Image (tube, rainbow, N blue to C red):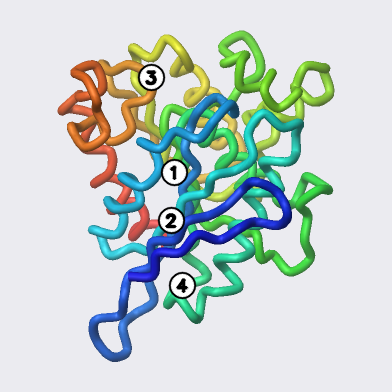
Amino acid sequence: MLNKKILLEKNEAYMTTYILDNIVDNQSKRPMVVIFPGGGYEYCASREGEPIACEFNSMGFNAAVVNYTTKAPYPQSLKDASDAIVYVREHAEEWNIDPNRIFVCGFSAGAHLAGSIGIMSKKEEAIKRDDDLNKVNGMILCYPVISSGKFAHRGSFNAIGATNDELLEKTSLELQVDENTPPAFIWHTFADEAVPMENSMFLAEAMRKHNVPFELHIYPDGVHGLALASEVTGDNGKYIVPHAQGWINLVKEWIYKFS
């Protein structure tokens, strides 16, 4: 396995790769999942990083975890996300990655970032490219921060300086969905009080309006920040919810369906 820490531009952001070895000749090219941990744009939660990458590796997928810049004005973290996708696509041949199966996976505020690079790559001047190297083929959004409105996780928007009306609208992702938005797998819990499930519902509604495919799961139980919802990422009982543990296997099916 190629496990490598890669600096992104000249800031504190970096990406750690989890690239599987080819065990047979002519190994088919693998999907790649680029992971963005949560943390309210205040920090990057380690429990939503490497354990998730290892799960994707166990499915035969390559993975990477991006420790993006936090506590920084918009669009710095979005630039980090764009740089990460570009770097992956530029190394697709070397790492045996299918360049048409590059997915982002984010948690909470990290899901907002994953959704932002998926939805905004053609909209945001700071990351717009003519070569499509930062194109996302699909989004895996886990209890995502989406809306800056009534059901917002206000701390996430404050952390990126989204306090005026113009920036609040730009960073409210359900308002930015269009026909170019990539397909999404979205999951949330009904019991999430930190980031209400309406965030996922708003995004799904917007995607339906623009005829963009998605899969949405709302689990009845579980606090915010479940990660794998198992003992692997649960340091106490509240993060262990057996019924919600199935999301990761559903994602595997979804990736093959939409790739």
Q: Which residue is mark 2?
A: 33
Q: Which residue is mark 3?
A: 224
Residues under numbered marks 3 and 2 in contact, where contact means CB atoms less than 8 Å apart: no
| Labels in figure, total | 4
Instruction: Give the image location of residue 113, x and y in percent.
Output: 59, 38
Instruction: Give the image location of residue 54, x and y in percent.
Output: 29, 53
- Residue displayed at 38% across by 19% down: 224
Q: Secondary structure at mark 1?
A: strand
Whether residue 142 sits left or right of residue 166 in the image: it is left
- Residue displayed at 59% across by 31% down: 206
Q: Which residue is mark 4?
A: 98
Q: Which residue is mark 1?
A: 140
Are there few (<14), some (14-19), or many (20+) residues within 10 Å of tag 1? Answer: many
Mark nearer the viewer, 4 or 2: 2
Which mark is first along the chain, 2 or 3?
2
Instruction: Give the image location of residue 232, x and y in percent.
Output: 21, 37
For badge 1, the amino acid type reads Ile
Q: Secondary structure at mark 2?
A: strand
Which mark is first along the chain, 2 or 4?
2
Q: Secondary structure at mark 4?
A: strand
Are there few (<14), some (14-19), or many (20+) residues within 10 Å of tag 3? Answer: many
Residues under numbered marks 1 and 2 in contact, where contact means CB atoms less than 8 Å apart: yes
Q: Gap in Å between the C-alphas at discs 4 and 2?
A: 11 Å
Q: Gap in Å between the C-alphas at discs 3 and 2?
A: 22 Å
- Return the residue nearer the eye: 256 or 234: 234
Are there few (<14), some (14-19), or many (20+) residues within 10 Å of tag 2? Answer: many
Q: Gap in Å between the C-alphas at discs 1 and 3?
A: 16 Å
For badge 4, the amino acid type reads Asp
Are there few (<14), some (14-19), or many (20+) residues within 10 Å of tag 4? Answer: some
For badge 3, the amino acid type reads His
